[in-house]
Amino acid sequence: MGNFSNKYNAPNGEPQSIDGMIGYAVRQGPIYAGQKSDGSFGYQDNYSPEAWLASESFVQNVSRNISASGQLTWNTPVDGLSFIGKVGMNYWTKYDKAYRADTYFDDSKTVGPATLNVWTANNTYTTFEALATYEKQIKNHTFKLLAGTSVEQSNNKGLEGYRNTFPNNYLYELGSGDKSTATNDSSLEEYALLSFFGRINYAWKDRYLLEVNLRYDGSSRFADGHRWGLFPSVSAGWRISEEDFWKNAAVSAVVDNLKLRASYGVLGNQNIGVYPYQQIYELGHDYPFGNPVTLQSGAYMKTYNNPEITWEKTAITDIGLDFSLLNGRFSGTLDYFYKYTSDILAPVEVSSIMGREVGQSNVGAVSNEGIEINLTYNGQIGRDFRFSISPNFTWVKNAVEKLANGATEEINNNRIVGQPIGIIYGYETDGLFVDQAEIDAAPEQLVSKSGLKPGYVKYKDISGPDGVPDGKVDAQYDRTVLGSTTPKFYYGLNLSASYKGFDFSALLQGLGGHKRLIGSYMAYAFYNGGQIQRWQAESCWKEENPDKWAEYPRLETLNMNDTNLQTSDYWVRNASFLRVKNIQIGYTFPKAWTKKIGLENVRVYVSGQNLFSFNSFYKGWDPENEIGTGDSPSYYPVNSIYSFGFNFKF
């Protein structure tokens, strides 16, 4: 199997990345021209999104993926006993080129120099597996046994080159750049995983089901003495609808299938980097030594890495119910799950007296508890109209359970024990100041009252050193959890219908129970010399209409650290949404028609992706497409895609 990608033109490099392009397009006001009749471009400071788009910059990615596998099975003379050998290989190679051209704004301004980065890499991943299976049935008892071992090996090599300053924007090979600017780098990553495993399956009359698994995995990514992990799991099922008492009950005429199941298992995660336990020394730190004193080459260990790190572990408990009603017309699954991930690698804070940084240790823990529901109803009206409705819903409670050094919170990392991952931590607000009298009567704010004006954000005094409001708003006592970027609800709906030759399908997806921030040019009018958006102008606080709950504060030039721009619930928005992800309508021509032209089947269809989104987020921005993190993340709009096509079957 081979996969290839094509060359495509795209903004390249900061600030000409996708998020940078959108951000500066929002920033640049309508007083700056786009492309002028003489071919030049208007620009603000050093930024011109239209000039960037028109430049010869490009990103070119070419990759190839070749996979091969083989299997040999020996069915022995012993009834039910088989030996299986498997081997697989995946070879992947890439060649990436990113060119940022000299960008012409006008005769007095060209931004450069042009830069070129070239990356090439190849990865060889091989697997070997030996299995022994045995199946045996004794009356109503069925046994299945499996034992095996496997080896996985990965070898990844990379090479990178860079130059800048090219004769023109059409000679974009490394050899054309200024030799004095040349840099290069290379990398080699290898790891291996050795596993031993076994499984036992037992069933009685296909009514009582039991499965037991055991894995013993060793990874080269951990040091000796810490690289092996034991991971058991067990699951059981009870097909209640197969019991005699159920078959004889009146309810059996309605319920076709009813199965209760439960499982518990532990999984290990070794994808934590290549060899994070090894100490790494940095070169280039020279020092004076000798007599006479000369500068000697030196190296030092910048970060102390913990040699005792080991597997991250996830224990999962699941209790579920599968059912089918009305001869399969209505079916579904209900699941309760609890997932506890422990020994999560996280950095440990230490005193600066050590004189160096400290790497990660197995110190964190996170839990996820929830309920998942999947339902399907298949219906029919008359002889020709058929339809299917399949809703799904998942509720998840996410919580940080443990932090490094027994800490209960890491405010700088937005983590608090008992709270979800991705909390938004900031100030609660009481709308906007209506007039000077309200400013005078308010608790001390983040700046002196002489620096406040009506229409500014009013922050709440929620606590103090004694645990009660102290008449002053400050960062230590008056910030709290405002929400989390981790959704609580995941929901969706699949719809399909057919009538004679016509068919219809739709997919709706959504997230809920979470919040998000937006910042900089996308949320703040006149920020850093930026422009203003319509909703800001129309919904802001005004002296003639001093609305305490106006959607936007008093219009002024804003910059970071402005008292109005602190992380607070004033800027937090509900990020819940429901998206019409896909709709497709098709028509299959009658076979009597298509066979006349030598075709078995002909179908024509039209489809659309990302057609509608229902949300209450900032106008013009999509809450799902976040770029970056922190207090001022960026967003980009969702692309709607429309397709038209034919399917032919000969």
Image (cartoon, grey):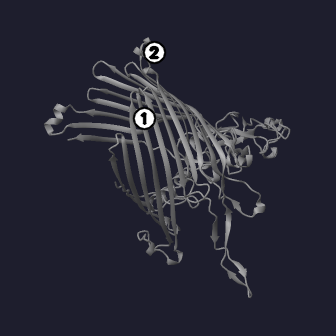
Residue 524 is left or right of residue 321, and the answer is right
Farthest-out residue, front = 78
Which tag is nearer the camera, tag 1 or tag 2? 1
Farthest-out residue, bottom = 292
Split into 4 quadrants, where in the image is the N terminus? bottom left
Farthest-out residue, top = 250
Q: Quadrant of residue 220?
A: bottom right
Indicate the position of residue 199 as horizontal and vertical percent values. 47, 41
| Label annotation for residue 569 | none
User: Callout 1: 10 Å neighbours few (<14), some, many (20+)?
Assistant: some
Q: Earlier in the sequence, mark 1 or mark 2?
A: 1
Q: Residue at x 41, y 32 (%)?
A: 142
Of residues 632 and 47, which is closer to you in this image?
632
Q: Which residue is mark 1?
A: 143
Q: Which residue is mark 2?
A: 245
Indicate the position of residue 319 as horizontal and vertical percent values. 54, 30
Indicate the position of residue 476 as horizontal and vertical percent values. 79, 45
